[in-house]
Image: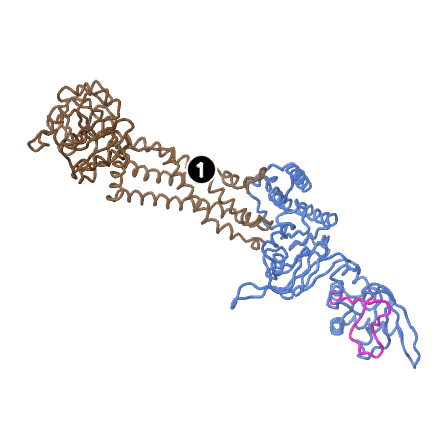
Chain colours: A brown, B blue
Amino acid sequence: MVRFGRIPLARKNLTHDYWRLAVAVGGIGFAVMLMFMQMGFRNALFDSTVKVIDELNADLIIVNRSQFALPAPQRFSIQRLVQARECPGVSGAYPLYVEGFLSTLRRPRQKAYAIRVLAFEVNDPVFRSTAIRQAMPRLKPPNTALIDSHSKPKYGIPVHDPERLSKQSIELSGRRVQFVGLFEMGADFANDGNVIMSAQNFARYFPYRGRGADPLSIVDLGIVRLTPHADVQEVQQHLENLLPDDVRVFTKQGFRQAEMGFWRTSTPIGYIFGVGLALGFVVGVIICYQIIFTSVSAHMPEFATLKAMGYRDRYFIALVVCESLYLSILGFIPGLLASWGLYTLLARWTGLLMILTLPRASLVYGFTLAMCMTSGCLAMRKVLSADPAELF
Amino acid sequence: MSQTVSLPATSSRLALTDVKTPNIQSRGLNFYFGDGELRKQVLFDNNLDVMPGEIVIMTGPSGSGKTTLLTLIGGLRTAKEGSLKVLKQEMVGASAQQLVRLRRQMGFIFQAHNLFESLTAFQNVKMALELFDFSQQEMRTRITETLTRLGLGHRIHYKPDSLSGGQRQRVAIARGLVHKPKLILADEPTAALDEKSGREVVTIFQELAREEGCTILIVTHDNRILDVADRIVNMVDGRIKSNVYVQESAKVCEFLQKCDFLRDLTPRTLVEVADKMFREDFSSGDTIIRQGDPGDKFYLIRKGSVEIEATRNGETKIVAVLGEGDFFGEMALLTDAPRNATVRAKEQTVLYALGKADFLSVIEQSPTFEQELRKSIFERQ
């Protein structure tokens, strides 16, 4: 339809009145931003929740069979890890201890806030983060720990000032703690911050975990590493058969998906943001329809004249589709920029992971295009109703 | 033999052997708005022929149906009854595709300029050419030529909001003319223009009609441009009340005025008489009036000649030969007596006839007419 040398009527009509164009772009940009925010929150929920899993240096993960989500811990005996080490193809099985209920962080004369504590046997390759690996030697002394630099600001930990950090007097569950380094993880919907420490220190801070027994004999997650060239599925199956029924063995990806699946299907949160996204879309359609409809209405006699001259319906269809396409692009760019800014701000304030990836931006653009096209189709009837017979 | 008796005398050019097919030909055209109970007829039995190169001005009060007729001719509405041929295409029952194809051969000029504010004069005009496969170079040449001809050579790349009202209208006219349409439909094209611009526009219309054989149909109330019309069609209440080929009407009046008994009639009455006459064609040797028949028409010879043959006392002889501009047949109408002579065409002859009722009503209206007629008859005896 668009031939070389043709008058670009769609573009000319859109850009003729700069003020109107600015309002249109603003309106569509706003709808784009609404969608980005809803999708951002929704993804932040999932991304933040599984961030800790992503950070694990695991091929397979052993969990208590009755565990349904990370914040609701179900533990199992370290004996299972000892058993797992015997399985062919397994090069190591390491415990990860997690405490989210008993652990609170408090500055002197301040309120205490709950924080998640992750603990591991120093020298076990449990985390992928090089920052954590490098900090391992520093975790050996008593009462030392690492603090998540993306923890919420409410803890009042001077994470960006190493000097003050080392001097700051802080209590973890009633015992002094010294932060000897940082790592990056971020908050999620259940946890506002993270602390990592050695298993030995963990046993000091939370001695009652074992209900009288060795606090380190009860494990939250088992991190399984495989020998090179071992088949993940095969070993997983093997481990499932080998270990008693009180635990399950997941691949890392499988565990990630199970965790996300819980949030997506078992909580209303996923739906709420889905509805929010849909509302953003609907608002966008309405705004966009208004804009295209007004632009079309203002040119009805001209369109009718073109019809009289012998322009066919498909010309007008192409025209409106073209206008919708331009509007979707023009509106998306400022919407994207504004959303990016808001994501950055929100990530800083809430510690949630607001990640703007290319596939996600593409998806929102897809929604934007659909939004503009829907509006275009609604406004199409108006254009096609232009009746040249009324011009005389 | 008489032919096409329904054709009014002054509705077309005389040229008998005008073989050109009309650009517009409507027969018994009816048109209705609405459906069912609400159906309202707005056009009644419209018959109209317009030849290539003719400029037709359509007048009539608002609501008379002239605009509706224009939209039917322009293929913007479709009629369901009667026949309407435009540029050889039958419009009644034509498909939307056919109408679109036909509309591309027409030029539309509307009362409002309907230009895109976002496009320059050049681009607005170009919209009309982009429907065809012209090269960019040819488009540029044509657009520049047309705009220059309309006195906008120095405003080619201006947008409508920096043009005056008259200039905008001329851009719209350029858009209607640039693709050299065979038929131009214009609705009050001069309404927005001052006297001078209006005159320029109609002059261009005349040139197009003369040089390109373009048919131009103008709906207007602007009596400043009546003089460009070859034909004036007057519509009242959905009917074509009069359809006058102006030059022919003038010619007939000139002839009528030459008759002694019509000399004192006002031009208006003469035109009315001329309008009521209808055309009859005869070949050489055809008998027009037979002696002894009852008289029903009054005749004016438009072209050709006739011989009058009277039989008196058993002797038949030719008493007179009448030529162009002469008239006959009035006596039987006035005296209510049978024809007193036989009239035969001597060659291919065109007569304009006036029916008895019309003839008598004209005479009743005008005592002078009757007096003159009686005197004339008296003198001829």
Q: Does the magenta stretch include residue B276?
A: yes
Q: Judge whether residue B349 is colored magenta.
A: no
In front: B44, or B245? B44
Residue A63 image point, x, y percent: 19, 35
One can see residue B274 in this view:
yes
Q: Is residue B237 visible?
A: no
Residue, disc 1: A329
List the single residue furthest toward the front: A88
Q: Which amino acid does label 1 sit on?
A: Ile
Please, which chain is the residue tagged with disc 1 on?
A
B362 relative position to A124: left or right: right
Between A41 and B311, the residue placed more toward the observer is A41
Count residues near mark 1 (Cα–Cα under 10 Å), then give few for <14, some for 14-19, many for 20+. Answer: some
The quadrant in which residue A202 appears is: top left
Q: Position of residue B309 (x, y in %)?
A: 89, 74
- Tell me how many marks there are: 1
Give the position of the N terminus of chain A as an image quadrant.
top right
Q: Residue A244 falls in which quadrant of the image?
A: top left
Magenta segment boundaries in residue numbering:
B273-301
Q: What element carries label 1?
A: helix
- How far from the left and from the top, in percent, is residue B100? 60, 52
From the viewer's side, name the closer residue of A86 and A311.
A86
Q: Quadrant of residue B345?
A: bottom right
